[in-house]
Image (cartoon, rainbow, N blue to C red):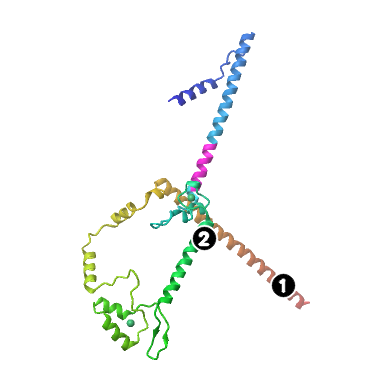
Amino acid sequence: MPPKKQKEVKKKSNVDKSFGMKNKKGSKAKKQIEQMNKQSFDFKKDEMRRQKEEAKFLREQEALTKQLLFNPVVKQPVVAKGVDPKTVLCPMYKLNNCNKGSNCKYSHDANLVANFIKQQNDARKEEEKLKQKEKPKLLNKKGNEVTSTDIICNFMIEMMEKQLWGFRLEEKHMEETQCKYVHQLPEGYIVKTAEQKRLEREMQENMPKITIEQFVEQERESLDKDHLTPLTLDLFKEINLKHKLMRMKIKENRLKKSMSMMMVTNLILSYIERDNKMMMMKRIN
Ligand SMILES: [Zn+2]
Ligand SMILES: [Zn+2]
């Protein structure tokens, strides 16, 4: 390794070569000494620069460690399919901690993201309004409008589970109860028949049971490792230490608070005592 060699050379040059020559007389020796001093001066400059670089490196490492320690682990947002990640505000940027700049997958423009969210919300509101308008007005027997509701009729669900719900039953049900609940399943709702429920229960009972350790490993495996900091023993110790310090700080603050409260109470008590004494004195006089 060439750098190592260089170091060795430098080390050697640090030795005062003029040792034992200083007492020699003659211009030749003097010149030699001068030259050596110059060399040693150059070396000192080199050494200083090296030390400076080393200090800088250490400072950077410290800053990095601090950042790792004191900034919470930020989970990258999960972006739904078809959504431009540039419409999601970078969570690291929010903490003033994203160094990817324009290369960042997520947006660094809070206004842009806010606008996008507002647009989305507006569109959703508009959609809901339209849906509300489309809903047929429910009338009771007297012909008055029944206040619309979003509650889904339990009877309907019950009958669906028994596979009895149909147009005729609905008609009968409406005639008998004037039910004002919604007789329409929301999107994505799955009605399970008793048979389906039984099958599901059986499936679950027959599922191979795994130990808690296996389960933890499974869950760990499924994590998105690219965006997470692996927990090493050192990191764990660091986090532990950080928590310990935090707890100590909280305790200290509590103690300080109660101390100051005690001081105030004592002060007030002493004032009352003094006033009482003065009153007594006045009475005696
Ligand atoms: Zn970013
Ligand atoms: Zn009903």
The residue drawn where x is 29% and y is 70% is: 190
The x and y percentages for residue 266 are 64, 66
Look at the numbered disc 2 and give the secondary structure of its residue.
helix
Q: Amino acid at mark 1?
A: Asp
Q: Amino acid at mark 2?
A: Asn
The residue drawn where x is 42% and y is 86% is: 145
Mark carried by residue 115: 2
Report the side of 48 relative to 220 (left or right): right
Q: Is residue 119 magenta?
A: no
Q: 194 or 256: nearer the eye?
A: 194
Residue designated by label 1: 275
Q: 205 or 268: nearer the eye?
A: 205
Quarter holding the C terminus?
Answer: bottom right
The x and y percentages for residue 159 are 27, 79
Task: Let me know if residue 70 appears in the view.
Answer: yes
Q: 24 or 156: nearer the eye?
A: 156
Is the residue marked by circle 2 packed among few (<14), some (14-19), or many (20+) residues within 10 Å? few
The residue drawn where x is 47% and y is 50% is: 241
Tell me which secondary structure the magenta stretch mostly adopts.
helix
Q: 20 or 78: nearer the eye?
A: 78
Q: Which residues are magenta?
A: 56-67
Vertical relation: 86 (above or below) 157: above
Look at the numbered disc 1 and give the secondary structure of its residue.
helix
